């Protein structure tokens, strides 16, 4: 339905912003990288269903744990879903 509506309007999506790769559960802030990655995989597959191959995400807080989760998470996602481009952005007040 969404794909048809976009096509009928002559629009094409170029990328999709998905939830952040924080290594944490959104509803409890509990550290659970595997759970966060499952959420991101679902978001990526939604983007692929819309015909996208470029997906935008950001990391978490500026901590050693969040950086380690970002590195491990990006590697995991790109190994599991190799036909996407993962575009990493920065957050406000984060380098």
Image (cartoon, rainbow, N blue to C red):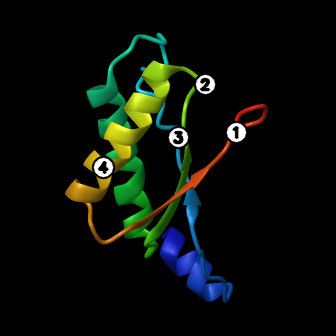
Spatial CA span between label 3 and label 1: 18 Å
Q: Quadrant of the C terminus?
A: top right
Residues under numbered marks 3 and 2 in contact, where contact means CB atoms less than 8 Å apart: no
Outermost right residue: 93
Element class at badge 4 = helix
Residue depicted at 66% across the width and 83% down the height:
11
Element class at badge 3 = loop
Spatial CA span between label 4 and label 2: 19 Å
Could you say which is closer to the camera, residue 76 or residue 55?
76
Which mark sits nearer the N-terminus, 4 or 3? 3
Residues under numbered marks 4 and 2 in contact, where contact means CB atoms less than 8 Å apart: no
Residues under numbered marks 1 and 2 in contact, where contact means CB atoms less than 8 Å apart: yes
In front: mark 4 or mark 3? 4
Q: Alpha-carbon neighbours of circle 4 within 10 Å: few (<14), some, or many (≥20)?
A: few
Task: Give the x, y percent position of residue 88.
Answer: 56, 53
Element class at badge 2 = loop
Q: Alpha-carbon neighbours of circle 3 within 10 Å: few (<14), some, or many (≥20)?
A: some
Q: Is residue 49 left or right of residue 54?
A: left
* Residue 95, label in figure: 1
Residue depicted at 37% across the width and 31% down the height:
36
Q: Is residue 36 above or below residue 89?
A: above
Q: Is residue 16 left or right of residue 41?
A: right
Residue depicted at 62% across the width and 87% down the height:
8
Spatial CA span between label 1 and label 2: 8 Å
Q: Alpha-carbon neighbours of circle 1 within 10 Å: few (<14), some, or many (≥20)?
A: few
Q: Which residue is mark 3?
A: 19
Which mark sits nearer the N-terminus, 4 or 1? 4
In front: mark 3 or mark 1? 1
* Residue 75, label in figure: 4
Q: Is residue 93 above or below residue 88?
A: above
Q: Which residue is mark 2?
A: 62
Which mark sits nearer the N-terminus, 4 or 2? 2
């Amino acid at each position: 339905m969404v794909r048809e509506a976009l096509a009928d309007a002559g629009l094409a999506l170029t990328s999709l912003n998905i939830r952040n790769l924080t290594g944490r559960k959104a509803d409890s802030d509990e550290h659970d990288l595997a759970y966060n990655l499952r959420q991101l995989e679902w978001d990526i597959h939604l983007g692929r269903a819309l015909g996208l191959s470029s997906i935008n995400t950001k990391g978490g807080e500026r901590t050693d744990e969040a950086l380690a989760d970002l590195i491990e998470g990006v590697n995991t996602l790109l190994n599991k879903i190799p036909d996407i481009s993962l575009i990493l952005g920065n957050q406000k007040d984060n380098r």
